[in-house]
Amino acid sequence: MDADLHMKMSKKIAQLTKVIFHLNTKNEDAAMELQATVYSHRKENDMLAKEAASKMGQLKDALDKREAQLKAMDNVKKVKERHQLDKAERLD
């Protein structure tokens, strides 16, 4: 009976050793996959941030250009108004 018990315990220990090895391997694989996912997300976030910064720069340049155009149009309007006033004063 001792030999039979010893054999059963040896088989159970071998079985548990295989389970532990399998779980460790699975855990290591999951850790590597998580690390790869984190790296991928960081890289993607960096790329998106650069694209957003570039687009914001382009929009700011377009806005600055438009503001300059509006200011120039306003200046032209003021000059025309001043010219009309001067012309009206000379005619009076």
Image (spheres, grey):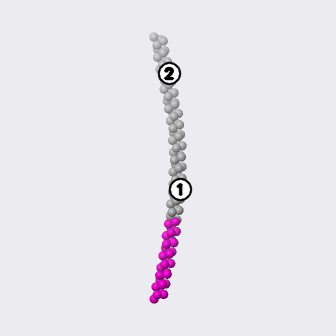
Any magenta on residue 8?
yes
Any magenta on residue 75?
no
Q: Main secondary structure of the magenta part?
A: helix
Distance between the alpha carbons at the discs numbered 1 and 2 = 60 Å
Which residue is painted at 46% across and 14% down in the image? 88
Q: Is residue 52 above or below residue 77?
A: below
- Residue 17, percent from left and from top: 50, 75
Which residue is painted at 48% across and 15% down in the image? 86
Nearer to the camera, 64 or 22: 22
Please name the amino acid that badge 1 sits on: Tyr
Quadrant where the N terminus is found in the figure: bottom left
Quadrant where the C terminus is found in the figure: top left
Nearer to the camera, 79 or 28: 28
Picture disc at residue 61: none
In the image, the segment drawn in magenta is 1-28
Q: In this view, does 90 lie above or below 43?
A: above
Which residue is painted at 50% across and 21% down in the image? 79
Q: Return the residue at label 2.
A: 79
Q: Is residue 26 above or below residue 43?
A: below
Crowdedness of circle 1 by 10 Å Cα count: few (<14), some, many (20+)?
A: few
Asked if marks 1 and 2 touch (Cβ < 8 Å), the reply is no
Badge 1 marks a residue whose secondary structure is helix
- Residue 90, percent from left and from top: 48, 12
Which residue is painted at 49% across and 30% down in the image? 70
Badge 2 marks a residue whose secondary structure is helix
Q: Return the residue at label 1.
A: 39
Nearer to the camera, 90 or 25: 25
Please name the amino acid that badge 2 sits on: Val
The numbered mark, 1 or 2, whose residue comes first in the sequence reads 1
Q: Residue furthest bottom?
A: 1
- Residue 51, percent from left and from top: 53, 46
